[in-house]
DNA sequence: GCGCTTGGGTTCTTCGCGCGAACTCAGCTA
DNA sequence: TAGCTGAGTTCGCGCGAAGAACCCAAGCGC
């Protein structure tokens, strides 16, 4: 059976991209990993329009990437912050992989803008492929096979 | 110095997303990793419109993710195929990380559509964070620091 | 009490771009 | 000679991102 016959839409990559492929979503997540939590901070830093940011945050809360949480600093009125859920934190490898690819192929002569280090150890952190047997796997050492949830194109649900 | 003061646009994540954040680009790459090389095969499989696919392929060739290569099967006229460059192959960890996140959080009860295995070894391949000292790093064990190419927001080139 | 400011949005208009369908064009085949 | 196919290009439509203006509730200075 040829992997090329798979229904494209049932692929987890396609389903993931339905959510995180929306404009600004991955950049909002990057801001969240950097520690930003408030609407106006994110909006200032990214330069995204308010209307788009509002609808993206709403979608990200609906998809359970972020949790909308009211909070109150002493002497202040109640405000809203958006904090990462476990599901949202699960996208960190995607962001690291993107940053690493950008560092390797796009930085020109300026050098790397942000270093990512292993806490305590201090060594540079990279995204890598590893197998469950503990080996680091090269891009060309990967084999793909149909799993239990695969579907052929003709039988796709939509 | 606070990471939140960085210029968002100089971040490698943002620069990477300028290219691979365009609609369909990561899905075209997924098809390329699955072995598709021809315009009409990719178009049939993804269901993307011809005009958009043509402009995305052009951009991906311009950005050196794909190489446009004429070829000729015996008795056929010359055709075009698109093959991954090293730079394009460098995005495989991004795709694996996305698929893995989709597998973990989006598949519902249908199971995983595609298995990825270490050639020879047979164990499941995952995207993970590792540090140069060889440790597998958890999402919460990461520290971020300014690198040589970082810029403050006020001094951004654009 | 009264306006000012601030955070967190909503509404409106414009404009770019993704979409589907139709058209093109070159080379192979009947 | 006509038809088919791969690889696009052209065109009109409609969605949705951008930006600017507007809204509103809570604190704060006076």
Image (cartoon, coloured by chain):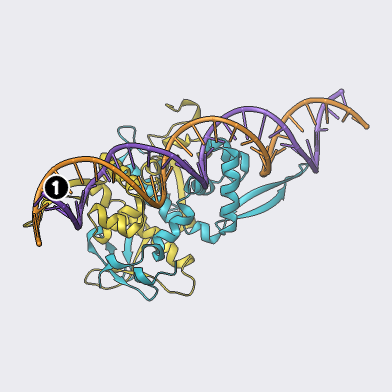
Chain colours: A cyan, B yellow, C orange, D purple
Query: Which part of the image, by quadrant, shows the N terminus of chain A?
Result: bottom left
Which chain is home to disc 1? B
Give whichever of B129, B22 is nearer the camera.
Answer: B22
Answer left or right for C12 relative to B20.
Answer: right
User: Can residue A4 be seen at all in this image of the molecule?
Assistant: yes
Give whichever of A35, A14 is nearer the camera.
Answer: A14
Position of residue D4 relative to residue C13, above or below, is below
Query: Which part of the image, by quadrant, shows the C terminus of chain A?
Result: bottom left
The local crowd at label 1, few if under 14, some if 14 to 19, many if 20 or more residues have their Cα within 10 Å, is few
Estimate the x, y position of residue B153 in percent, counting from the top left.
Answer: 49, 30
Answer left or right for C14 relative to B80.
Answer: right
State the residue position of label 1: B70
Give whichever of D7, B25 is nearer the camera.
Answer: D7
For the point 36% across and 50% down, which residue is it?
Answer: B49
User: Can residue A125 be seen at all in this image of the molecule?
Assistant: no
Estimate the x, y position of residue B64 in percent, counting from the top left.
Answer: 25, 42
For the point 29% across and 71% down, which residue is it?
Answer: A145
For the point 40% across and 48% down, which residue is it?
Answer: B23
For the point 61% across and 50% down, which residue is it?
Answer: A82
Estimate the x, y position of residue A18 in percent, counting from the top left.
Answer: 46, 56
Task: Count up the numbered dots.
Answer: 1
The kind of secondary structure element at disc 1 is strand
Answer left or right for B80 relative to B149.
Answer: left
Position of residue B16 relative to residue A9, above or below, is above
Estimate the x, y position of residue D14 in percent, counting from the top left.
Answer: 51, 46
Give the quadrant of residue A75.
top right
The extreme left residue here reads B74
Position of residue A125 relative to residue A4, above or below, is above
């Amino acid at each position: 059976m040829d992997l090329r016959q798979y229904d494209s839409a049932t692929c987890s990559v396609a389903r993931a991209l339905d959510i995180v492929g929306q404009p600004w979503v991955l950049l909002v997540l990057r801001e969240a990993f950097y520690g930003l939590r408030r609407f106006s901070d994110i909006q200032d830093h990214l330069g995204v329009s308010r209307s788009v940011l509002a609808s993206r945050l709403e979608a990200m809360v609906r998809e359970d990437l972020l949790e909308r949480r009211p909070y109150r600093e002493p002497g202040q009125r109640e405000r809203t912050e958006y904090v990462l859920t476990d599901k949202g934190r699960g996208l960190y490898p995607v962001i690291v992989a993107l940053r690493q690819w950008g560092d390797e192929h796009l930085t020109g002569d300026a050098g790397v803008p942000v270093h990512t280090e292993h806490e305590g150890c201090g060594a540079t952190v990279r995204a890598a492929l590893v197998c469950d047997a503990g080996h680091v796997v090269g891009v060309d050492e990967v084999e793909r096979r149909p799993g239990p949830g695969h579907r052929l194109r003709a039988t796709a649900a939509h």
